[in-house]
Image (cartoon, rainbow, N blue to C red):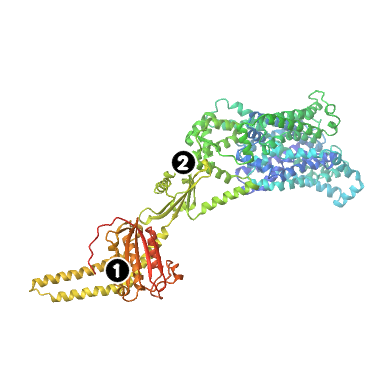
Amino acid sequence: MTLEAGWLLAAATGYLSLLFLIALAAERGWLPDRLLRHPAVYVLSLGVFATSWSFYGSVGFAASDGYQFLTIYLGPTLAFLLAPVLLAPILRLAREHQLTSLADLFTFRYRSQAAGVAVTLFMLVGSLPYIALQIRAVTESAQVLTRQTPPHLLALAFCALLILFATLFGARHAAPGERHEGLVAAVAFESLVKLAALLAVGALALFGVFGGPGGLNEWLAANPAALERMYEPVHSGSWTTLLLLAFAAAFLLPRQFHMAFTEATDARGLRIAAWGFPLFLLLLNLAIPPILWAGQERGLAGAPDYFVLALPQAEGNALLTIAAFLGGVSAASAMVIVTTLALAAMAMNHLLLPASLTRRPPEGGNLYRWLLWSRRGLVALIILAGYAFHLLLQQRAGLVEMGLISFVAVAQFLPGIVGLLLWPRATRQGFVAGLLGGGTVWAGLLLLPLLERAGFLAFGLDPAALLGTVATESPWFTATTASLAVNGALFLAVSLATRPTEAEARAARACVQATPPATGVVAAGSAEQFSERLAEAVGPEVARREVRRALKDLDLAPDEDRPGELTRLREQIERNLSGLMGPLLARMIVDERLRLEPHTRQALADTVRHVEARLADSTIELHGLSRELDSLRRYHRQVLHDLPLGAATVALDGEVIHWNQSLVTLTGIDEEAATGRPVAELPAPWGGLLAGFLRTDDRRLRKVQVGQGEATRWLNLHKAAIEADRDAAGTVVLVEDLTDLQRLEAELAHSERLASVGRLAAGVAHEIGNPVTNIDGLAQALDPADPQAVTTGLGQIRTQTRRISDILQALMRFSHGGDADTRASEPVAVAPLVEEAIRLVAVSGSGKRAAFERHIATDLAVLGDEPRLLQVLVNLLGNAADASPAGGTVEISAEAEGDAIVLDLIDEGGGIEPDHLERLFEPFFTTKAPGEGTGLGLAVVYHIVQAHYGRIDIESRAGEGTRVNLRLPAAPAPETRHEEPI
């Protein structure tokens, strides 16, 4: 069965058109975003590793090297099993610093444009044989199916289709770091197609040729040489070398780096790829041995490389033959498209841009257009260069040979990766010297002999004569060992002979840990100034768009002017520009146009918030001590954030570092609005209150009143110095909200006053009744004819009326003691206060049983709230009168002791049991009979005395009476008002 070349071209064109539709559907949002960002799509996109070498050449590789063909898949499996320590750090760097290629990665680490140029040129030269291999595989597969030499137009048409697809869906954005949803979806679909096609051919070999696993076992038993040929190369071959080459290629090939890191959505995809990608490779390899043995059983002519096509053709299965052909087209097209996109990004950032941007940038938005079309032009140029290399080599090399040339080239970057991940002492000079030395050996042992065999060059090189017969018996072992030995030796020696610059040292630290915050403050003071300064390098429109983009990435306002936030904005702009034009050029532009003031130390608040933000946004998974420290940091921060007390930490320069949730609730000031601001600039009244407290020497302020009316709040303020070191010193302020407690105490005190009023009501009624009776009698006895008697009677009536008024006013003052939240402390004379308390207690029944003796100087005064102090004395004197026997005496004395007034109240009652003394001030505890007390009296007394910064002590022994000692702050005595005796 033969097929026409036109039909094959039509099938390939139709298949690539289907890829266009899939990519278009992804780009236009016709496919669900949940599907496009599913980890399975990411895993399948990594299947770009399996090229036409894997699809076709693996059978030929198995025919010549037996089970060594598995090394090409065991190497990537090992690399992805080491993903947490090998691939995850690279992914973190690529995402954090917008590194879109291997050249960007090494340029970032070694801070050298020469490193980027060397990597780009070496990768271009090393990838051309691999691109040519894909083009050759498509044309040779067409030759197998048509049984005739295909015209060069077929290869050229294939290249044209690839250029069209790559430019439309792989180079849609000016910045190569932006994810291409359509490209990823198309590559994932291609991986499914080639896997399904290869498994289908394998099923044909197993069941169609051998009749099932039993038939295959019978054939192997009858042909032991076939199985022996599979094992023999493993014992004598260089499988370790091939394993190393495949290991390096799994993440260093341009297409693998692009799909694994540039197009990655998140770290979760990489974690799943650690087992998903090896599973994909395992499934891909299951069909290789059955296809090889089936081809040998059928005696297929031609190279084993194309048994995948020849077997279904020989079996007369046209549908499967076309499917196998399209599987090969999938493998080749995916490799060429992704590889050229990656190489174009390298060439743009490290060859074209550094030379082009030395001139004045294009005006308006032309820079983006120029970048986009330059990338597309580079894509076309690289694909056409691969086509030219294909024409040059023609039929002179096998698929595996051409593929391994690129694998050995990629392996030259392994020493650089060691320096990136494990050896901070490595220098740019060592990296470039090692790469040039290893590259020279690679070219001499592999590339130049290939060109010489193709008839393009005539150097007369004989690797066997130079290195011995082992060079021809195992060329990959020789070339790999020699090139890596020279590379590693130069890398080590030159790095030890030179010293890394400060920029290299910072980059080396960034490769193994989160990037430390920049030191200094940006000279530009606003986002508008950022745009103006960047415009000189990239043009005004590009500058405005990049600044707006960075502001959006950081969720900052356009008028942001905080120094710490501007420093973060500067770093975000550098990352975004790195994705647009490479890390070194981005760093040069930002350093020149957005200069830091090195002598201005960045505020501690900004540094802390920067580190917190970076750690919160970091996708890297910490391990060991770093993970424990980060967990401890998060725990302590959460404790501070959820503390039921308001907590703020303030740096030495007065800027707020932390502002917890309780303070947000209390003050109404958001954490984002508070942090990074000087504490004095916080909204009133909080800015003035906290700033003033920080300036005082007091470590505690008690009962601070804030606000008026219903908005009044009562606070306790505490502070403590933080003296970790000079750069981390500051103060922590705790704000305790006592408003609810204060209001509750006021309500309890008022309730107790009302209860006392109730208890006094009967006595008050009796006391008022006597004067009223007297007034009535005096009024009846008045004789209008005797003026002297009238005058005397009226005077006595006024005396009795004033007595009633005094009793009622005392009771009213006591019951309406006022709201403690709105009364200020004032001098209160002690003697009148005691007299008024005695007057109120005397009207009660118990008060009539006891006599009150006073020993109080008239010039003594305390500082406080008169109604609340009156409540204290009424409660204490009432308790003393209740405890006293009939005819007993309650002694009240007062004297000055320093800055305090000490009152002693001594009764002759039965005393208090020792077990009860410790509970006297507990709410609702009482020693009286049920119904005779609320148990709130002494509790209210205690809180009132505490609020007046006083002290109360009670001494008592059973049967010996009780002594109450009351200390209150002294004040100058006010004018003593005249009191009528009772």
* In-front residue for pair 121/342: 121
What percent of the width, then of the height, locates residue 107?
A: 64, 33
* In-front residue for pair 425/289: 425
Q: Is residue 869 above or below residue 318?
A: below
Q: Residue at x 53, y 39 (%)?
A: 568
In the displayed structure image, the side of residue 648 where residue 442 appears, left or right: right
Residue indicated by mark 2? 653
What percent of the width, then of the height, locates residue 794?
A: 14, 70
* In-front residue for pair 64/796: 796
In the displayed structure image, the side of residue 130 where residue 512 appears, left or right: left
What percent of the width, then of the height, locates residue 373?
A: 61, 31
Q: Earlier in the sequence, mark 1 or mark 2?
A: 2
Q: Please state, as top left, top right, bottom left or bottom right, where the C terminus lies in the image.
A: bottom left
Q: Is residue 232 above or below residue 387?
A: below
Q: Please state, as top left, top right, bottom left or bottom right, where the N terminus lies in the image.
A: top right
Farthest-out residue, left: 785
Under circle 2, the secondary element is loop
Residues packed near mark 1 inside 10 Å, few (<14), some (14 to 19) or many (20 plus): few
- In this view, the mark in front (1 or 2): 1
Q: Residue at x 27, y 61 (%)?
A: 858
Q: Amino acid at mark 1?
A: Glu
Q: Which of the 4 image quarters holds residue 798?
A: bottom left
Q: How many marks?
A: 2
Q: Residue 759 has which mark?
A: none
Q: CA distance from mark 1 to mark 2?
A: 61 Å
What percent of the width, then of the height, locates residue 220?
A: 89, 47
Residues packed near mark 2 inside 10 Å, few (<14), some (14 to 19) or many (20 plus): few
Q: Is residue 753 visible?
A: no
Q: Which of the 4 image quarters holds residue 774?
A: bottom left
Residue indicated by mark 1? 853
Q: Amino acid at mark 2?
A: Asp
Under circle 1, the secondary element is strand
